[in-house]
Amino acid sequence: MSFLDQIQKRRSIYAIGKNLTADQDAVEETIKQAVRLSPSSFNSQTSRVVILFGESHLQFWGIVRETLRKIVPEAAFAGTDAKISSFEAGFGTALFYEDQAAVKALQEQFALYADNFPVWSEHSTAIAQFAVWTALSEQNIGASLQHYNPIVDEEVAAAFTIPDSWKLRAQLVFGSIEAPAGEKTFMDDAERFKTFK
């Protein structure tokens, strides 16, 4: 399968389950390898990932549920609760962080580019997220990227002993594909691209 085929296969899969043929160790190694191989400016390697399986995976989504229960109106909470339940049905979750201490060290070491390192850090996490998502998809593992940060950051940091310098950027929940992704539409190329020859 070509790289473009792999990108095309990677979709937001919301109907996920625990029915994987791969075990936790194999999935963990796929995630680690994808992050290791992801490029970063100055080879900064600012991305950090916390991989949750089993009770830890459920604990994370429980934190999200209870945090949202305090925010979402009671009349609308049933839909929120169902969504969180669909994530709990998955095999695991990868929490993507960026190490702000590493970013600060780079700012100090390369003062001329100091303003750029926080931006480049966001690029790094996005590339790592995309790489992991695509690598899992290649193994027929469905996933969807979620963003419940910053509302859960403190409680999650306490629950999983996350260093103070790590900033939560996204959550990739993954599992067996229980239903395919819906149709994907694309905007007109003329509105998105310009080519000069």
Image (spheres, helix red, strand yellow):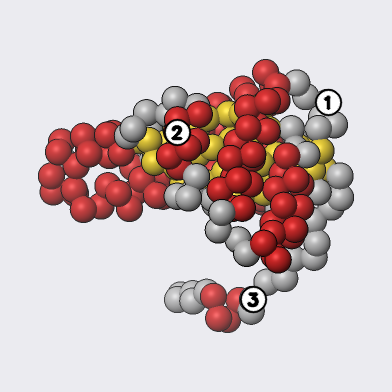
Quadrant in which the N terminus appears: top right
Residue 40 pos. (x, y %): 39, 40
Q: Residue at x 45, y 76 (%)?
A: 196
Q: Look at the numbered discs 2 and 1 and tell me whether their residues touch, using CB distance below 8 Å.
A: no
Q: State the image coordinates of residue 135 (x, y, percent, origin top left).
A: 65, 37
The residue wearing badge 1 is 21
**Mark 3 vs mark 1: which is more N-terminal?**
1
For residue 187, which numbered disc appears in the image?
3
Q: Quadrant of residue 53?
A: top right
Q: Earlier in the sequence, mark 2 or mark 1?
A: 1
Q: CA distance from mark 3 to mark 2?
A: 39 Å
Q: Amino acid at mark 2?
A: Ala
Secondary structure found at label 2: helix
Q: Residue at x 76, y 52 (%)?
A: 82
Relative to 106, does residue 76 appear above or below in the rendering?
A: below
> Which mark's residue is nearer the viewer, 3 or 2?
2
Secondary element type, mark 1: loop
| Residue type (three-letter) at the residue carrying disc 1 | Thr
Q: Is residue 13 above or below residue 153?
A: below
Left or right? Give the position of 124 relative to 141.
left
